[in-house]
Image (cartoon, rainbow, N blue to C red):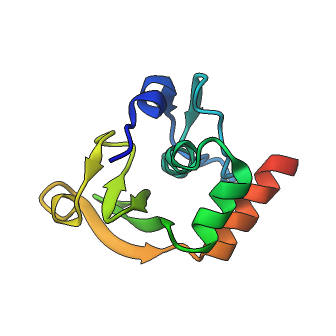
């Protein structure tokens, strides 16, 4: 399975804005230090899997090779990345199986984000 070392070494978690600002999904060049929330972490891992190629990243998301799931972590919304039946997320910072993601670890199954929505949010973040 793809290593998460580069992303984990350079990623610092910060919560999504709670002051009324819109949460912007950003694809970071995770070979450099950056801060972000759970969607940013998922996109950084997806970007690394895609060879740091934004066209390939878009293709992988649109074809379902990479999925970003909306779920619950305790009482809050959360996003995790699925790739080859494994899940990567910013709490554990390692690949886990769906069995590991279920309670009591606290990540509850959810639904996949629409791949077109993810791609549009990603494209908007590149140009805005």
Decide if residue 22 is in sight here: no
Image position of 64 with respect to 20: above or below: below
Residue 112 is situated, as x and y percent measured from the top left of the image, at: 47, 74
Residue 39 placed where, x, y %? 53, 52
In the image shown, does 125 or 57 lie closer to the viewer? Answer: 57
The answer to whether residue 86 is left or right of residue 45 is left
Residue shown at the point (33%, 57%) measured from the top left: 87
At a point 36% along the width and 63% down the height, the residue shown is: 84
Front-most of residues 12 and 4: 4
- What residue lies at 37% left-to-right and 74% top-to-bottom? 110
Which residue sits furthest right? 127
User: In terms of image quadrants, where is residue 72?
Assistant: bottom left
Q: Is residue 46 above or below residue 116?
A: above
In the displayed structure, 113 sits above or below 86; it is below
Drawn side of residue 32 relative to residue 127, left or right = left
Q: How many marks?
A: 0
Residue 3 percent coordinates (x, y): 37, 37
At horizontal 51% and vertical 47% (from top left) the residue drawn is 49
Q: On the picture, is 89 further left or further right than 98?
A: right
């Amino acid at each position: 399975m793809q290593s998460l070392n580069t992303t984990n070494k350079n990623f610092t978690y910060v919560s999504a804005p709670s002051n009324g600002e819109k949460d912007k999904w950003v694809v970071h060049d995770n070979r450099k230090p950056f801060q972000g929330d759970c969607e940013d972490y998922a996109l950084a891992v997806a970007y690394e899997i895609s060879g740091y190629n934004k066209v390939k990243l878009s293709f992988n998301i649109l074809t379902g090779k990479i999925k970003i799931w909306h779920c619950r972590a305790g009482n809050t919304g959360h996003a995790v990345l699925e790739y080859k039946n494994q899940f990567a997320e910013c709490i554990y910072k390692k690949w886990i199986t769906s069995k590991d993601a279920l309670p009591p670890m606290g990540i509850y199954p959810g639904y996949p984000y629409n791949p077109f929505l993810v791609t549009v949010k990603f494209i908007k973040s590149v140009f805005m």
